[in-house]
Image (spheres, grey):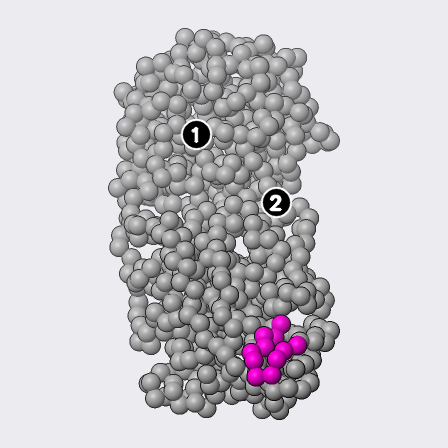
Amino acid sequence: MTEFAPVVVKGIADQVVELPIGDGPATGYSWLLDLPAGVVRIGDGPAKHVDAERGLGASASGAIRVVASKGSYRISARLVRPWEPENPAAAMVIDLIIE
Amino acid sequence: MPGLDISKLREDIKSRGLKWDAIELPNDFKPRGLGWNPAPSEMLRAALETSQRLMVTRMAHLFRQPMNIGQAPSSLGGPAGSPSHPKSFDWRSHITLGPVTDQGYCGSCVSHATTGVIGTMAGIEHSSASVYLSEADQHFCSSHGPNCHGWNNGDAMNQIKSRGVVSSIDFPYMTAFDNPPIGDPNDVPDHLWIAHCRAVADRDRKVYKITEISAWTGDDRKTYIANVGPLACGYTVYEDFDHYGGGVYRHVYGAVRGGHAVMVIGYSDDEQCWICRNSWGANSGGSARPDGTGAGFFKIGYGECGIDNEAFFGAQGVIAPASLKWGGWWSVAGGVAAPGTSVFGVSRSVDKLDVFCVGSDHGTDTAAWQPGDTAWRGWWRVKDGVAAPNTSISAVSRSADKLDIFCVGTDQHVYTAAWQPGNASWGGWWPVAGGVAAPGTSVFGVSRSADKLDIFCVGSDHGTYTAAWQPGDTAWRGWWRVQGGMAAPNTSITAVSRSADKLDIFCVGADHRIYTAAWQSGDTSWRGWWPVAGGVAAPGTSVFGVSRSIDKLDIFAIGTDMQVYTAAWQSGDSSWRGWWPIGHFKAAPGSSVYAVSRSADKLDIFAVGQDGGIYSAAWQAGDTAWRGWWRILGGAAAPNSMLTAVVRSTDHLDIFAVGTDQHIYTAAWKL
């Protein structure tokens, strides 16, 4: 499992904040977020442009986005498959600072 | 936007009358909001354009008669009937597929799908188990490059055709990554797993290649799957597919993940679905179920998730690496051959080899090897002979340790030279009865019984001629015209003696049909020419044959489609049987297929492929199909040359080639 160093993301209260992660290519893996109270996940960002020559296996998902009220939060994210959640491919801690 | 609620997903599946199950999520899998975006249309449009380029318009072209079907097509390379498909088909009922692979967190699905198709085709075409090919070599070391980005099935197939792919043993998938995989935290998710291309030692000798790529749409996909093999497809994955747990998947809702490639191994018209092998590990889709789903396999409805937007890709003509029993390529004493010539050899007694070539100065040269030699000896010039352009020297050993060779001189006259033990040097060159050969032809001969020689040539008028010599003759007798036959330009007449004092000869006629004529002791004239099962040969090629046991004949030709074909005759047959294609292999222009029988009822053939590679295929009694083609040790041949072979003892083969550098090389195989 890849465990990334904690990332700090800053945002403004009640405005959309884009997290530095997005669901990757079609591999069965998706980010499972442990969202603290006060943080709400909204629709993902716009799909990425996919080069036609590399269309199969490319990630088309947009960035994961949240909205939160003022405060500091810690979001735990794990990249897992539904059928083997105990084997995450990666994990990341995101410290969200909303002003 | 609501999250992906599995309970609701299940209700929706049920209410829509769909027949697939959503996997129960773990307890800590929390609902979350999802954005939704349409599948990128430019990806699908480009895929369609790619498929159109590769589309095979004549379905029947792909289907050729297997060896055990005796009905002859009207000409080589012609269609052989209209194929059809059953209502359902699943390759798992016919062959052991390779393992369900796991691409991990890497967009390498195309390479998992395409190597899966080709590994399975290797099993189908070579009558063996499927071969597990290296997705890592395919994805990270090809034109795609060492990264986890996506690809497309057409380009991936073309890479296997041009550069090949090694087996998984040579480059296991997970060794392309660090252990554990590491990524670039500044580029998540695309570089979550950083991939590396690892060098494979002696790769050229280890690769599997394909000779044909095809793309299929509509019901032709089913026909192909049921008659030929699996296909690689692409479709759009949505979030709900991550939760697939059996049945026939149809998209209900959820965000788009992106394009995905898988291997299609079957279909069911009753269930209106394709049967696919995924590359998300053996646990994807849940446990194996009686309906054939789970454990990495799934069913997806016809037309679902844009699966019809891109053609399904197939591959045929899997070229496997040669057996480890091959050794070579070794230079034959540094010899260099003239362009457009080939090296012919003969074994004058057990384990002795003599080869002959037209050198770069058009001189007639020979080299030899015998037990105890650590290297080839030669080259020696044979009596200052000089050969005509684009001709080769052929050889016959009419009895133990005697050599007779034949060539066309610069004056187009036919000459012979001879050597036998005790001679300090070669005798010759003697003109053979004033015969004059057509440009670009060579003279081939055979010994129908001890110390008797019969040779055959295309005359300057393109007529078919023969001359003979036997003990007691003070000069060659001939030339006699063989039944008014006329040969095509740049072809030669070849001969086989299937038993004592019987001769069978083969030529490509002026109409490019393949003909045979025969003579045996007691005949006052040749019989023939008879067309051989309607076969038509490519221009500039000749037909070589062999007798694998008494009174059996097998001949080999390159058809007008450049495919290699064979036909057979044996005592009792009222006509020739064939032509059967040998695999899906296309030969280089201007080359011919050479055949030997290394022991009773065994056949080995050698040909130069369209990529210049040196290839072999084999058949032996009991085989229902030819085995091969195998590429021999990464060898490559010069244009307009052919491979030749010598059986120096039972089940011991030596082959000879003029390389792309015009040097002469040999390789050997021993059972």
Query: Would residue A55 be found to the left or right of residue B273 on screen?
Result: right
Residue B540, percent across and down?
A: 39, 27
- Find numbered disc 1 in the image and state the secondary structure of the residue it sits on: loop
Q: Is residue B14 above or below residue B631?
A: below
Q: Is residue B281 left or right of residue B502?
A: right
Label 2: chain? B
Q: Secondary structure at mark 2?
A: helix
Res B12 → quadrant: bottom left
Q: Residue at x 34, y 36 (%)?
A: B560
Give me the residue at 49% from left, 85% from top.
B3
Q: CA distance from mark 2 to mark 1?
A: 25 Å
Expressed as whole percent of the image width and height from the top left, the position of residue B56 reads: 34, 50
The amino acid type found where label 2 is placed reads: Asp
Tell me the magenta residue range: A10-20
Depicted B47 relative to depicted B498: above or below:
below
Amino acid type indicated by mark 1:
Gly
Does B351 lie within the magenta span? no
Quarter assignment of residue B216: bottom left
Circle number at residue B590: 1
Query: Compared with residue B25, is residue B404 higher up or lower down, i.e. above or below?
Result: above
